[in-house]
Image: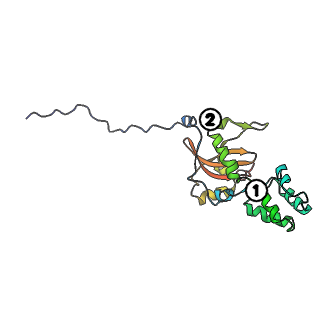
Amino acid sequence: MNKIPKSSIIPSKQKSPNKEYSPSLVKDHYASWQFNKIDMNGKWGLEKIINEIEFDFNDDLLKELPHNLDNDVYKAIDKLSGRRFKSLNDLLNILIEESNNKISATEQKIVINSIGESIFWSEVIPKLKSLEGFNWHELERQQFGKQNKTKHHNVSVSKICKDAQKRLEELKLDDCDELFSLRLSGTFRIWGIRQFGFLQLLWIDPDHEVYPV
């Protein structure tokens, strides 16, 4: 019986190194988002913002209100214009108190009908959709203001406020060295952890409290 000759090639015991993921290549990816790490009930959590509304006393609302509107009611509505409220009930309760209980059920209904979607649906989601049209290189080059500050950038965890650092510990995310900040408008920021080509959304920060400057 003929024997099969053994191969003279000695297989290498060394493993091929894993291909490294270049940060430069990652930034060529278009921005995308993940919600799996979003904080639900913290100070900047989703539950706080999901029902939050902004009240605006505009010309359309003024036309709908009665011409003989009580002066206290008018002052109360005008005073609350431009403010954000935790919910619709929060707005109505404050409105009733500010008007010295003079606002009628009909006038309350008119105010309610004048309010659109919550800030989350009217501002956050549309802005995130619009940013998906840019890759990370393009986002990091966007600027604003006379000093040409960058809109979207990394921030070291050591620089964010103590409450935010403590919340990271509670969420067991304190192993992160930095967070990524998205500027929606004015003081409005969204915070997340960037992993490869996507951002794991973490906090919704309307008042720039996470990293006050």
For the N terminus, the quadrant is top left
Neighbourhood count class around disc 2 (C-alpha, 10 Å): few under 14, some 14–19, many 20 upward:
some
Q: In this view, does 96 lie above or below 205?
A: below
Q: Where is residue 8 in the image (x, y as percent from the top left)?
A: 23, 31
Residue 168 shown left or right of residue 118 in the figure: left
Q: In the image, is 123 to the left or to the right of 58?
A: left
Residue in the picture at 70% in, 53% down? 117
Compared with 95, 13 (above or below) is: above
The residue beneath circle 2 is 137
The residue shown at (19%, 34%) is 6
Residue at the far top in the pictured view: 8
Earlier sequence position, callout 1 versus callout 2:
1
Q: Name the residue under label 1.
A: 113
Local crowd size for mark 1, using a 10 Å CA cut-off: few (<14), some (14–19), many (≥20): few
Label 1 or label 2, whichever lies nearer to me, is 1
Closest to the observer: 19 or 117? Answer: 117
Q: What residue type is disc 1 on?
A: Asn
Q: Which residue lies furthest to the bottom in this view?
A: 101
Q: Residue 154 carries which label?
A: none
Mark 2 falls on what kind of element? helix
* C-alpha gap between disc 1 and disc 2: 42 Å
What is the quadrant of residue 26 in the picture?
top right
The colour style of the image is rainbow
